[in-house]
Amino acid sequence: MTHDWSPSGLKQAIRQWGRELGFAAIGCAPATPLDDAGYLNWLAAGHHGGMDYMARNLDKRARPAELVPGTRSVISVRLDYAAADLPAPEPDAAVVSRYALGRDYHKVMRQRLQRLAERIATVTGPFGHRAFADSAPVREVDLAALAGLGWRGKHTLLLSRSGSWFFLGELYTDLDLPADPPAADHCGRCTACLAACPTGAFVAPYMLDARRCISYLTIEHHGSIPLALRPLMGTRIYGCDDCQLTCPWNRFARPAAVADFQPRQGLESARLAELIAWSETEFDDRLAGSPIRRIGHERWLRNLAVAIGNAPRSAANRQALLARRDHPSALVREHVAWALEQFDTIAPASPGNPS
């Protein structure tokens, strides 16, 4: 059988090999410089908060060939993670972003990208490449949009006709592959994602102020959570999915085919009082291989204290806070004290937990 190993034929083969590795979509983008204007305006407004790394390596971030010299094409891939039939959270249950319920995707993504590169090399011979999975200054949403995998939604995430519950990865290559046409924007006049944000983090369509985003506050932010935002966080302890949960396109999302992304450690229904009782050793052991482990035990307790302050005023929740009242960390003590103060106020009407 004769194979077509022209650039176009190779790209079609790469798409097939990618599907065999579990990627839901594969596209190619040229390694041309990306438009900087919107990104630089976002940085200038301070919307990146304490994520100083996002303001570094700007040339490499916008120019793939400067990050990896010799890059001519970027192969962009999508790996779905949606979990099927998740239970609605109980009022005293911790809410964890869906992407973090299973194993950390970085290693899963890189391993599959490397296997894809090895498969390509059986045809092309050794070629220049480097795999990325949110691990370097890469504008992955912009590259994926250029590669035709979807469009940037008004919530700033990549969105496709089958939703947004997926991870993105890239293979920078020195192969000269035909570029795929960019996808058209299909958000239309819908603003459901913007209205759903509990903290009003969207200052405009396609513009997120990370400093008000619950995902930023619970994951990237190292210090004290602003007092005004704490009551708005509900019982979310790691990330927030509200803008995705309300997006009409996610009705068409397909459940993850990768077993690693299925919920682990019962995090889809764990009680707050149980989680805040974990010792640092339990935290490290139970969350081995989980993306949650990166925030460390101190911020884990900080987040849980805020969540319990927003949860039902039960004896179990109060006792869980009292057990942490004298924690060695001033950060933890501050948030526990705030949560205990909430028990002396009128209980709020469920501050925006996702349904």
Image (spheres, grey):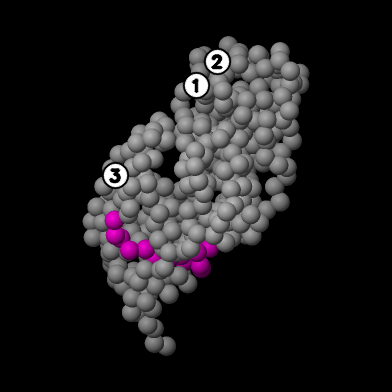
Give the amino acid at mark 1: Ser
Nearest to N terminus: mark 3 or mark 2:
3
Instruction: Write down the region rendered in magenta.
Output: 18-33
Label 3 – label 1 distance at C-alpha: 29 Å
Give the image location of residue 323, x and y in percent: 64, 15
Vertical side of 85 occupied by 337: above or below: above
Residue 327 found in image quarter: top right
Residue 175 vs residue 157: left or right? left
At 28% from the left and 53% from the top, the residue drawn is 63
Residue 51 in view here: no
Residue 139 vs residue 253: left or right? left
Vertical side of 89 occupied by 165: above or below: below
Give the image location of residue 33, x and y in percent: 29, 56
Vertical side of 252 occupied by 295: above or below: above
Mark 3 vs mark 2, foreground winner is 3
| Residue 229 counted in the magenta span | no
Query: Where does label 1 land, which residue?
Result: 224
Nearest to N terminus: mark 1 or mark 2:
1
At 73% from the left and 28% from the top, the residue drawn is 349
Residue 146 in view here: yes
Bin the neighbour count of mark 3 within 10 Å (Cα to Cα): few under 14, some 14-19, many 20 and up: some
Q: Pointers 3 and 1 in contact (CB under 8 A)?
A: no
Give the amino acid at mark 3: Leu
Query: Where does label 2 land, which residue?
Result: 334
